[in-house]
Image (spheres, rainbow, N blue to C red):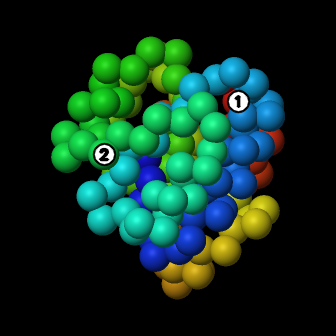
């Protein structure tokens, strides 16, 4: 679940590439926020084995229908919904190659017990 953070997408692309190395052959779906920039979309399109979802259907509907999935987001409220068939990770606390300046202006918190706040990419696991 991406967020319109006015960045170039390189942090998320790096993270997704690392996860593809860790879980080769795994399909990645990116549900775009309606305000996601074209720059970030182009960065995502460079990834292999990725499907980009450009739908105005709320992310919560997609989340409720998933099975055996990892759901990632910087800090989307769409992850407030719990789907016990999946694992949830906020990625705002990962500092490795995190160049999102907007995150440094705010204090992000995790109000959900079912969402793990990852502090490194390697902490994201099935």
Residue 43 lies in what quarter of the image? bottom right
Q: Nearer the viewer, residue 3 or 14?
A: 14
- Circle 2 crowding by C-alpha within 10 Å: few under 14, some 14–19, many from 20: few
Q: Gap between marks 1 and 2, in whole Å?
A: 26 Å
Q: Determine the residue positioned at 19% across, 40% down.
A: 57
Residue at the disc numbered 1? 125
Q: Is residue 120 left or right of residue 83?
A: right
Q: Nearer the viewer, mark 1 or mark 2?
A: 2
Residue 84: x and y, percent? Answer: 44, 20
- Circle 1 crowding by C-alpha within 10 Å: few under 14, some 14–19, many from 20: few
Residue at the disc numbered 2? 54
Secondary structure of the residue carrying tag 1 is loop
Say if 121 sits above or below 108 in the image: above
Instruction: Residue lying at the far left in this picture: please name it.
Output: 57
Residue 83: x and y, percent? Answer: 39, 24
Secondary structure of the residue carrying tag 2 is loop
Which numbered marker is on residue 71? none
Say if 10 sits above or below 69 in the image: below
First in sequence: mark 1 vs mark 2: 2
Residue 5 seen:
yes
Q: Determine the residue positioned at 35% across, 30% down.
A: 63
Q: Determine the residue positioned at 78% across, 62% down.
A: 96
The answer to whether mark 1 and mark 2 are in CB contact below 8 A is: no
Q: Nearer the viewer, residue 71 or 34?
A: 34
Say if 61 sits above or below 105 in the image: above
Q: Is residue 125 left or right of residue 50?
A: right
Residue 123 seen:
no
Q: Determine the residue positioned at 53% across, 43% down.
A: 72
Q: Is residue 48 left or right of residue 33?
A: right
Q: Dividing the image into 4 quarters, which one contains the C terminus?
A: top right
Residue 98: x and y, percent? Answer: 69, 68
Residue 53: x and y, percent? Answer: 35, 40
């Amino acid at each position: 679940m991406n967020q319109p953070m006015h960045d170039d997408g390189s942090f998320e692309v790096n993270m997704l590439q690392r996860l593809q190395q860790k879980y080769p052959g795994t399909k990645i779906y990116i549900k775009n926020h309606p305000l996601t920039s074209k720059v970030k979309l182009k960065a995502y399109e460079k990834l292999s084995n990725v499907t980009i979802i450009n739908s105005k259907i709320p992310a919560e509907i997609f989340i409720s229908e998933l099975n055996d999935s990892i759901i990632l987001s910087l800090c989307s409220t769409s992850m407030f919904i719990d789907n016990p068939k999946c694992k949830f990770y906020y990625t705002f606390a990962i500092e490795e190659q995190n160049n999102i300046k907007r995150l440094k202006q705010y204090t992000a918190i995790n109000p959900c017990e079912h969402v793990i706040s990852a502090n490194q990419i390697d902490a994201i696991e099935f």
